[in-house]
Image: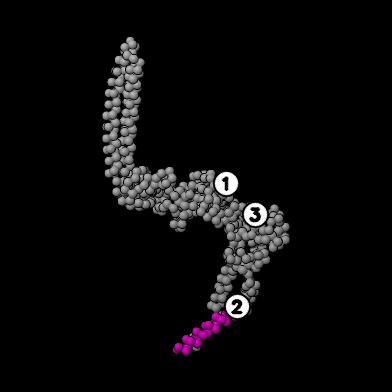
Amino acid sequence: MGKVLLIGGAVVVVGVVGAGVALTQTSLGETLKARFERHEEAATVRLEAVGRSDVTRSVSAPGLVEPRTKVEISAQVSARIVALPFEEGDVVRAGDVVVRLDSEDLTARLEAAKARLKAQEARFRGSEADLAVALSDFGRKRELHDTGDISDVAYEQSENRYNQAVATVEMATADVEIARAQIIEAERNLANAVISSPINGVITTLNAEVGELVVVGTLNNAGSIILEIADLSDMLLMARVDESNIAQVRAAQDATVYVNAYRDEPFFGLVERVGLERRRWTDGTYYYEAEIKLRDNPDRPLLSGLSATAEISVQELRDVLVVPSQSVLDRRIDELPKPTVDGAEGIVDKRKTFASVVYIIEEGKARAVPVSVGPSDLAETVILAGLDEGDRVITGPFKTIVGIADGTPVRDEVEVEAEAAEAEALADAKAADAPTADPGS
């Protein structure tokens, strides 16, 4: 029985092979064979029809994500930190106490200022009493001098004592004002021992520890930055626009922002301000700063300092002829067929070295078609002249089209796949019709 089955299987294989050989001997088989032999050296390419679409031209600008509002908390008095109620990353509200400084010395200074005020007020009252005595004496001496009862010397001495008493009162008055101002300063310093958050936000940086001595800054020396608070609900991209593109960027333009930390999908924003001063980046390049307001996305919080790239929409074109950008190639004009160049008057500038072309298929070969191109985005390029809507151009594969030239044998991948499917179907049909040996014979 096993021998019978083996023999039967062999007969089936022979039958199928025989069917294939028989197929090649028919007129249809000869046609398919000739078709494959004719195209075996042709490159398979992908074609797409020229269509109409909307194209947005954009300017690319890298940058860093920063909060619109960020404050640095530093001390206005020199003292040691006794409490830091919040940690880095904590959310704070305006008015929350974020730093407490040692207030013992500050309290003592306030008490001393109050004591000085009392002393100055006492001196002021004493000077007022002296002034009253001097004024009374000066009045009597003036009357006696007018009647000739005292000498000029005695009168002048009395007048000098009065003027001196007036000056003493004025000095005492000033001392009292100074003492009061010192109390105000001491009270303010004491109040500055408790530092509150001026905004709603998040503590993004904490630079100090409890027990450290904070130093007050001066004109030439920066003070101690204890912590930083930022409002992460209102974020900006500080984009660096190359000086060659800055003339196209304006406020109110839309922007698509690609943040490195969120590669799955972009953020969207709006240009709010374009800087007027050229700046220099760390790599030596020059740029202008554009502030882009990013739309809030609670599901994807943005952190201060994230790297990102903005595509700023500077021009929108509606219902224009477009082709895939990779299908537009630059070719040397002297390598293109002369009839092709002569037939593209107004499109090919013979004074230049290169011309923009796309490729179509004519009689199984690639033919270069010069085109005049307009703006392009990341995927499509606008065609201003050289093609009509519905024309089919070669768009891929990329490795094939970069090396393609006028006259290169090519085939449409759709036709190749259809012919392969047709040949396979015919082979299957012929194999099904081939006679097979009876396993039982």
177 or 168: nearer the viewer: 168
> If you read the primary sequence from the N terminus, does the residue marked by circle 1 or circle 2 appear first?
2
Q: Position of residue 399 (x, y in %)?
A: 58, 66
413 or 441: nearer the viewer: 413
Q: Amino acid at mark 2?
A: Leu
Q: Please name the residue that numbered disc 1 is placed on.
A: 247
What residue is rendered at 55% in x and 51% in y? 286
Q: Amino acid at mark 1?
A: Ala
Q: Is residue 19 magenta?
A: yes
Mark 1 → mark 2, Cα distance in angstroms: 69 Å
Mark 3 → mark 2, Cα distance in angstroms: 50 Å
Q: Say few, some or many: other residues with alpha carbon within 10 Å of mark 1 (under 14 / 14 to 19 / 20 or more).
A: few
> If you read the primary sequence from the N terminus, does the residue marked by circle 3 or circle 1 appear first?
1
Determine whether, in the image, residue 180 is placed left or right of residue 328: left
Q: Please name the residue that numbered disc 3 is placed on.
A: 372
Task: Answer above or below: position of 85 versus 430.
Answer: above
| Disc sitting over residue 23 in the figure | 2
> If you read the primary sequence from the N terminus, does the residue marked by circle 3 or circle 2 appear first?
2
Secondary structure beneath label 2: helix
Q: Is residue 89 magenta?
A: no
Quadrant into which the N terminus falls: bottom left
What residue is rendered at 41% in x and 44% in y? 218
Asked if labels 2 and 3 touch by Cβ distance under 8 angstroms, the answer is no
Q: Which residues are magenta?
A: 1-20
Asked if labels 1 and 3 touch by Cβ distance under 8 angstroms, the answer is no
What residue is rendered at 57% in x and 82% in y? 18
Mark 3 → mark 1, Cα distance in angstroms: 24 Å
